[in-house]
Image: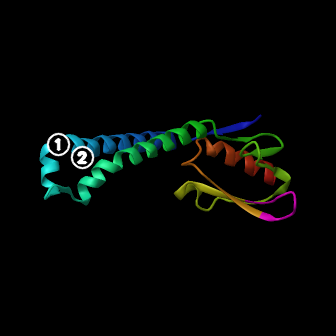
Amino acid sequence: MAVVAPFSQYKKTNHKIYILMLVVAAAWFAYDGYFSRKFKAKHTKDGVADSTLVFHRKGPPYLLAGAVVIAVYSLIARNKKIVADEQELVLSAKEKIPYSSIESINKTNYDSKGYFIIAYKDSAGKELQKKISNRTFDNLDAVVELLVSKITG
């Protein structure tokens, strides 16, 4: 029986909030920089725009680009998941950790801070550590329980 930990709803919600904040800031800056007569008059000296007005005119495309970058990352990351099956822990298509190579699971901060650290050896024998957080993946309780049972039993 495989246990799946999908990409966290916490992260998905945060991505939506960041996108909304960037779009609202871009609209606000564009309004102030191009349409608000009062704002333009306040930040123009002798017919020359000061640094605040210049920023409000040049900033919106960068803010919108940031929103697009976050949206693209969110679309890519929405299908991320951890799968703990009978033989290995699958973190991605390229990163799989066989249970036989896992040396320890440090759950010291799991209850208080929501993450655990897996110490394992890769195929070359190099010792590596992987930190997995419940802010990135949901259903980690079941994954940790299965990992512990596979390592100890």
Q: Are marks 2 and 1 in contact (CB under 8 Å)?
A: yes
Which residue: 49% across, 43% down? 70
Q: Quadrant of the N terminus?
A: top right
Q: Is residue 50 visible?
A: yes
Location of mark 1 (residue): 36
Determine crowd level at label 2: few under 14, some 14-19, many 20+ residues with C-alpha closer than 10 A: many
Farthest residue to the bottom: give it: 127
Q: Is residue 10 visible?
A: no
Instruction: Return the mark for residue 112.
Output: none
Which residue: 12% across, 46% down? 38
Return the residue nearer the eye: 82 or 140: 82
Q: CA distance from mark 2 to mark 1?
A: 7 Å
Q: Position of residue 104 (x, y in %)?
A: 75, 61
Return the residue nearer the eye: 17 or 4: 17
Query: Which amino acid, mark 2?
Result: Gly
**In the rendered view, does 136 fall on the left or right side of 20?**
right
Q: Which residues are magenta?
A: 119-127
Determine crowd level at label 1: few under 14, some 14-19, many 20+ residues with C-alpha closer than 10 A: few
